[in-house]
Image: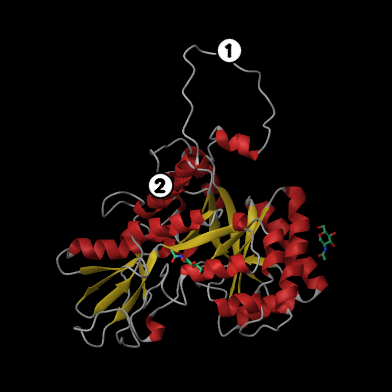
Amino acid sequence: MTPLGVLLGLLLTLAARHTAGQDVTTHDRVVVCYFGSWAFYRPEEGKFTVDNIDPQLCTHVVYAFAGLDETSHKIRSLDPNLDLDAGGGHGSKKYSDMAKDPVKRAKFINSTIDFLTTHGFDGLDLDWEYPARRMGIPEDKQNFVKLVEELREAYEPRGWLLTAAVAAPQSIISVSYDVPKLSKLLNYIHIMSYDYHGKWDQETGHNAPLTGEELSVNATLNTYLELGADPAKLVLGVPLYGRTFKLVDVDRHEVGDPTAEKAFKGPYTREDGFLGYNEMCEMRAAEPIAWTTRWDDEAKVPYVFHKNMWVSLDDEQSITNKVELAMRYELAGAMVWTLDTDDFRGNCGTKYKLMRAINHALSTAQRGTEPPPTEPPTTPEPEPEPEEPKSTAAATACHLPALLALTVLSLVARG
Ligand SMILES: *[C@@H]1O[C@H](CO)[C@@H](O)[C@H](O)[C@H]1NC(C)=O
Ligand SMILES: *[C@@H]1O[C@H](CO)[C@@H](O)[C@H](O)[C@H]1NC(C)=O
């Protein structure tokens, strides 16, 4: 079962909507939207299907996930109900075995061509977590480059995109990635700049602090740039979810206060330690006075708490700050993990509030760097002869809308 045909049809029919300043037609940056096929199985208001995608808010939709068959070394569908191609470092070892052997690489690359063609995808996103880590070998770092090189060669003539999702911690980046080479070969690098802190720390902390910590979004960005990434290839990841914690002492609710091993889960995503933005906003709407909201001015993110529940999350303001920083570094744009946990139904107010905040911040940043528009001529000029577009910049200048999001398939291995 693949909802992909449906997805493409849907993207075509929804392509005409427009909301001022808050969609992808108002800027020339990328907005990469991952969505999890497993979101289809969430109960009630959490259920997310391809019909819920608003393609005006994304330039690229990344369908998560496909997997790797360890005996044939071919790409394969993953049962979306079994969450990930993972378990005890096993996912990572399969990649490692495939990437080190030229014959297996060729077989794999071949299989992706069939798979992408059959399902009508526009590209492949590699989500190997992580080369040379867990059950990988040190050679993974260069074998990953070889794999990417050969994929690039196979995809280029087909006009397909090749991207990768990469780690946030500096300790992984330096071991796993040959940043300058990957930056040359990939169309985009999706930085997974979240999960900096969670219940596993057994103290409260921010899921994705922008600044002020050794482990922060800003530090991650600086690491990639210092290692030689082309900023025009970097896409900043923004979480549309929060991390939950259970306080040990309800009176100790600052950042860094002790928390229990177990946290709590939301009604839709049902994963301990994780909470969709949609779940959080509905919980707060149900008990508006109960929840206390604080803003951490150093980390530039909010956190909320009620009794022994403590949540680090992103909101419109923190996401706007992140996108502004990404634009100061002149990055390619923003990526979200995942579309299906925004308030996509508008149950708390504006539909897709966070996705709109991202697009709004991108278009605001862009307007800020552009010269003011010239006055329109007072007398209508004759229609100019159609010309070949001179460059991408010229095409951007006349605001050719990205009406159709490109759909990319994400291949995962999580160890
Ligand atoms: C790749 O596919 C082509 C055409 O289907 C086939 O001829 C070739 O043997 C395949 N190569 C590998 C390594 O599987
Ligand atoms: C981001 O990090 C750089 C390099 O460490 C630093 O110069 C800059 O001030 C930081 N930006 C913010 C907004 O803190």
Indicate the secondary structure of the residue bearing disc 2.
helix
Residue nearest the observer in this picture, 222 or 279: 222
Residue 407 left/right relative to 338 = right
Q: Is mark 1 within 8 Å of ligand 2?
A: no
Q: Amino acid at mark 2?
A: His
Quarter of the rendering occupied by the N terminus: bottom right
Residue at the spot of label 1: 382
Q: Residue at x 52, y 39 (%)?
A: 403
Separation of residues labelled 1 and 2 (CA atoms): 34 Å
Q: Amino acid at mark 1?
A: Pro
Position of residue 392 relative to residue 121, above or below, is above
| Quadrant in the picture for residue 129 | bottom right
- Residue 81 visible, this orientation: no
Q: Residue at x 61, y 78 (%)?
A: 91
User: Which percent across, then down, holds residue 312?
Assistant: 33, 72
Indicate the secondary structure of the residue bearing disc 1.
loop
Q: Is mark 2 within 8 Å of ligand 2?
A: no
| Label 2 CA crowd tier, 10 Å (few <14, some 14–19, many 20+) | many
Identify the mark at residue 141; answer none if there is no mark: none
Residue at the spot of label 2: 360
Position of residue 134 relative to residue 31, above or below, is below
CB-based contact (under 8 Å), mark 1 and mark 2: no
Q: Residue at x 49, y 49 (%)?
A: 58
| Label 1 CA crowd tier, 10 Å (few <14, some 14–19, many 20+) | few
Residue 353 left/right relative to 13 = left
User: Which percent across, then down, holds residue 349?
Assistant: 26, 51
User: Which percent across, then down, holds residue 327?
Assistant: 50, 53
